[in-house]
Image: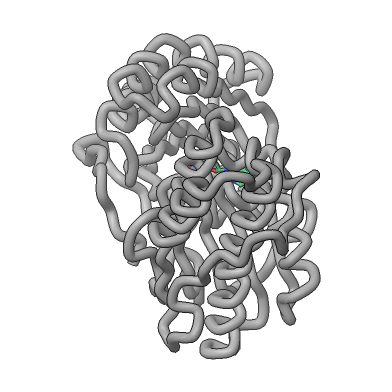
Amino acid sequence: MRVLGIETSCDETGIAIIEDGRRIIASEVASQIDVHAAFGGVVPEIASRQHTECIHQLTDRVIEKAGGRPDVVAATHGPGLMGSLLVGVNFAKALAYTWRVPYVPVHHIEGHIFSVFLAESAPEFPFLALIVSGGHTLLIRCDNPHQYELLGTTRDDAIGECFDKVARLLNLPYPGGPSIQRAAETGDPKAIAFPRAMASSDSLEFSYSGLKTAVLYKLRENGHKTEDVAASFQYAAVDILIRKTRAALEKTGLPALVVAGGVAANKHLRERLAKDIPVPVFVPPFSLCVDNGAMIAAAGHSLYIHGKTGDLSSTARATWPIA
Ligand code: KG4
Ligand code: ZN
């Protein structure tokens, strides 16, 4: 069975066709990074216009590469930017209606979780998922497909948002994650001891706004090398993730960890996961960490085989809790 996945929740237009929930047949991602970089972040109105401009062409290309239409259409219904979501949702519903195939609305975070099933080695349920992206920092207990319990989230900024804001403080280009990672390569991660918010507390909640402010105050003292600030910030930001994830694994006894979302592309995070997590860790390949259509198709496939299809009257949701 072939599923078309359509992702337009933020600043990537992702279109893909996958087979049997595991194999990518064709995938195209149009990133808007260059357009938004001039503003230092995503401009919602520009984002939705960009999706409108390329969605048709990308879909044609994917269908041509796959050699035909899919059996099911799936699209991200939320959470995300309303204007951007509506472009993908309405386009996808029109395709499902015209082709007379089932339609599946997908939760963006569920897409990130399912991106791991497109990797060579995939986990079995149950597992703990750590979702780290521009909009989310989540620890989720995943007992069965589509049965989730939110264990912890951020009280303020998401980790990717924190990378983006700190990069701006350091005059590094948008998106902040990759540019901080690059600057950190030649910096000393022990140069500055940044705070670990709520590290000692028993809770699985995160807070990243204090870390961003700590960087701001540090920069007011002159004489710190950008590379050292970047490396020390990255070290602290990742250390919090590792501590909270270990605590969640201890608390739940879950036998495996899935890490997904844009920040899962971070090399330092991947090194710490390999070194400091006591259970098998599953991380999707780099290309599937940032938003893409294949992960939405993978979640859509599973939703479809579990009877969780939608209908054409359902619409986008800017906010949508995972559990
Ligand atoms: O999952 P994603 O593409 O979009 C959302 O759903 O938010 O994640 C984008 C986020 C951005 O904040 C970006 O700075 C961050 O992922 N990111 C990284 C890296 N690559 C992307 N953060 C740290 N290290 C990276 N290598
Ligand atoms: Zn995402």
Residue 2: x %, y % from top left:
59, 37
User: Residue at coordinates 26% horizontally, 33% vertically from top-left?
Assistant: 82
**Left or right of 281, for residue 157:** left
Q: Depth check: give the residue in front, 6 or 137.
A: 137
User: Residue at coordinates 52% horizontally, 50% vertically from top-left?
Assistant: 221
The relative height of residue 151 versus residue 178 in the rendered view (above or below) is: below
The relative height of residue 110 versus residue 105 in the rendered view (above or below) is: below
Tell me if I can see residue 249 in this picture.
Answer: yes
**Left or right of 62, for residue 308:** left
In the orientation shown, which residue stands out farthest toward the front? Answer: 222
In the orientation shown, which residue stands out farthest toward the left? Answer: 313
Q: Depth check: give the residue in front, 229 or 124.
A: 229
Residue 193: x %, y % from top left:
61, 66
- Asked which quadrant contains residue 158, the reply is bottom left
User: Residue at coordinates 59% horizontally, 38% vertically from top-left?
Assistant: 294
Q: How is the image coloured?
A: one colour
Q: Depth check: give the residue in front, 206 or 301.
A: 206
Residue 64: x %, y % from top left:
63, 14
Residue 198: x %, y % from top left:
44, 77
Q: Quadrant of the N terminus?
A: top right
Tell me if I can see residue 71 in this picture.
Answer: no
The relative height of residue 105 versus residue 100 in the rendered view (above or below) is: below
**Left or right of 47, for residue 115:** right
Q: Quadrant of the C terminus?
A: bottom left
